[in-house]
Every structure is written in structure tokens, then in C-alpha cells.
Image (cartoon, helix red, strand yellow):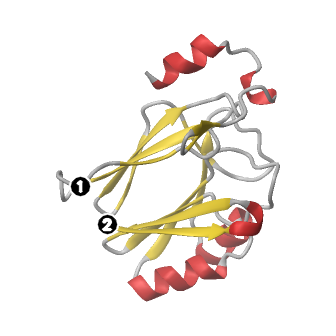
Amino acid sequence: MKFKQFYLGCLAHASYYLGSENEAAIIDPQRDVDQYIEEAKTNGQEIKYIIETHSHADFVSGHLELAEKTGAKIIYGERANTAFPTHKVKDGDELNVGKIRLKFLETPGHTPEGITILAENTENGSEPLKMFTGDTLFIGDVGRPDLIGSKGFTAEDMGGMLY
């Protein structure tokens, strides 16, 4: 499995490249999409999916431009309200990127459509899973569930979705 984090310090924005065999997925892309296209080219991979863990109010995503340049599908959580074509995922849905299995969990709280992605290398069972939470969880902290995303869910409801 090819894994790479792209971090934009001025916005505290992390995005991720996951690749296996000849396929790749980009999670929460930055506005500058050429870096992902170059990474895919370097690895001999084609970007198949562009996954947004949630709608971002704090930066402009490059998902539309990246989809236009690569033909990749844009993936959002089922509750997302978008004005452009997307493939919606819900709790338990899975997609494959080469030998990587992506399992989706609905984790509303920060935003209603928030999703968490579990990535498993099906070729190497001893490799630890990777989890991409968007702004739901941070290292040593949690996202902001007091924003619009928690509308209709109690803290117990949201906790029960994770455990």
C-alpha cells in the first residue's frame, strides 16, 4: 500500500494519497491538485476516487478540478447536499482501491454528512488499519460537534455511532 500525507501548514489541512496496484484515492484534497496527479504518475497509478470526509468551510477543496482532470468519482457521505455529481456512501459501504479495502462509517457531528474511512490492505493482514476521520477526531482532541453537524444528534447518539 502506498500512503502519503500532504500537509498545508498555513491552513492546518491534511490530505492523503492511498494507492495500490494501478489505482489511487485522494482523501480531502487541497486546492492544488497537480501534486496528486504527479504522485499518481510517479507511482504508475490512476486516481479512481476523490473522497471528502465532510464539507469543508475552512478551505476550498480541489475535488471538482481533480475529478475533471482525472475522471475520478467524487465520494461524499450520504447526507451530503451537493450541486455536482457525487457517489454517496453510507454506514458499512465498501470500495476497493487495488488491494486496499475502504470501509465507510457515518460519523456526523462536525457536519451532518461526516464520514470516517477505515483502510485495510487486503494483501497484508499484519499491516495496521488506517483511519481517516476528517475533522471528527484529532490527535488528542475532538472536532467541533457543537456546529450545525450535531443538529438532531445527542452526544450519546454520536458516541454510539463510533463504539
Question: Mark 1 sits on what residue?
Answer: 127
- Percent across and percent down for residue 60 are 80, 61
Task: Specify the label residue 117 is tagged with.
Answer: none
The image quarter containing residue 28 is: bottom right
Q: Amino acid at mark 2?
A: Met
User: Nearer the N terminus, badge 1 or badge 2?
Assistant: 2
Q: Residue at x 67, y 44 (%)?
A: 54
Drawn side of residue 79 relative to residue 5, left or right:
right
Dot 1: within a 10 Å radius of its alpha carbon, few (fewer than 14), some, or many (20 or more) residues? Answer: few
Q: Nearer the viewer, residue 36 or 162?
A: 162
Which mark is in front, 1 or 2?
1
The furthest residue to the front: 140
Q: Residue at x 69, y 63 (%)?
A: 63
- Percent across and percent down for residue 67 are 65, 68
Tell me whether the residue at label 1 lies in contact with that at label 2, contact meaning CB atoms closer than 8 angstroms: yes
| Cα–Cα span, label 1 and label 2 | 9 Å
- Percent across and percent down for residue 62 are 72, 67
Drawn side of residue 61 relative to residue 89, left or right:
right
Q: Mark 1 falls on what kind of element? A: loop
Q: Nearer the viewer, residue 49 or 55?
A: 55
Locate the N terminus and report the quarter of the image it occupies.
bottom left
- Percent across and percent down for residue 88 are 59, 41
Question: Please, is residue 36 above or below residue 76 in the view?
Answer: below
Question: Please, is residue 56 above or below residue 146 in the view?
Answer: below
Q: Residue at x 77, y 20 (%)?
A: 151
Q: Mark 2 falls on what kind of element? A: loop
Question: Mark 2 sits on what residue?
Answer: 1
The image quarter containing residue 72 is: bottom right
Q: Residue at x 52, y 40 (%)?
A: 116
